Amino acid sequence: MVDCFNKNIDNLKLKKLWLFDMDGTIYLENSLFKKVKNLLNFITENGGNYVFITNNSSKSVADYVEKLTAMGLSVNEENFFTSSQAAALFLNKNHAGELVYAQGTTSFINELNKNNVLVTTNYDENAKVILVSFDTELTSEKIRTTCKMLTKVSATYYATNPDWVCPVDFGYIPDCGSMCEGYFLATGKRPEFIGKPSPFMVDEVVKKYGVNKNDAVVLGDRLYTDIASGVNAGVDTVFVLSGEGTLKTLNESEVKPTYVLNGVWEILE
């Protein structure tokens, strides 16, 4: 088999750890792409493991297990590593015991609490960290509180992910990166991003499974997050054209994947 540029992809089938993005890579909103179940079965039948590493912090791991199970996939919590989990792990490593002001969905806040992060969602001058996530429950009150925190409180500022948009069935909606750009225009402050394109998520999963990086691969539809995280971590990458990314964005990008496919279904064709 070859990719969109006639590059042989046969060695992909030898990989032992597959790190999939979700939105735009294995499904679009609530519609699973073809042959995803076949591909996951192929991976496990050949002694490999797959983990969904998503920058979408609006849902908890339990939410994602429920969502993908409803799509017909056999998954459990071990198959996921979200930017919410990455944020909690990062904060516990770097800001243990410090109060964190967090803006996010109820699921996101619950995920932080579950991982023993000391969280407030109210204005609090005692907070040492400000954390913004992709918030599908965003209100004007939340926006005002976050801006007040950024303006009046001296705290380290993080965000879960820099994605500009999130794909939906009719197109796109603003994601965390767009929200943070709005906060920059209002407050003059920009965050450090914890999720992809940082290699943090890839490195943590590779470490957990104890595989050589040559045996891992990242698959995603965004060059500036998914593919960049794999490149930054030193693993092979597959850029799929089933979501946000296009050949035009590939031509214009400095980030270059190992392989380019129309979709993950082509791996088994």
Image (cartoon, helix red, strand yellow):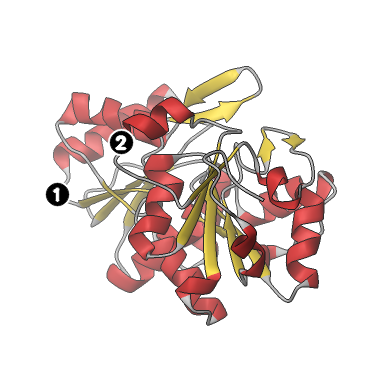
Relative side of 191 to 68, left or right: left
Please give the name of the residue rendered at 60% of the width and 36% of the height, measured from the top-left corner.
24
Where is residue 116 shown, x and y percent of the image?
A: 47, 68
Where is residue 224 shown, x and y percent of the image?
A: 37, 41
Question: Does any portion of residue 8 appear in the rendered image?
Answer: yes
Where is residue 133 shown, x and y percent of the image?
A: 42, 43
The amino acid pointed to by label 1 is Ser
The local secondary structure at tag 1 comes to: loop
According to the image, label 2 marks what residue? 146
Relative side of 64 to 42, left or right: left
Please give the name of the residue rendered at 48% of the width and 32% of the height, measured from the top-left corner.
245
Question: Does any portion of residue 161 appear in the rendered image?
Answer: no
The crowd level at tag 1 (other Cα within 10 Å; few <14, some 14-19, many 20+) is: some
Relative side of 171 to 127, left or right: right
Tell me where residue 233 sits by quadrant.
bottom left
According to the image, label 1 marks what residue? 154
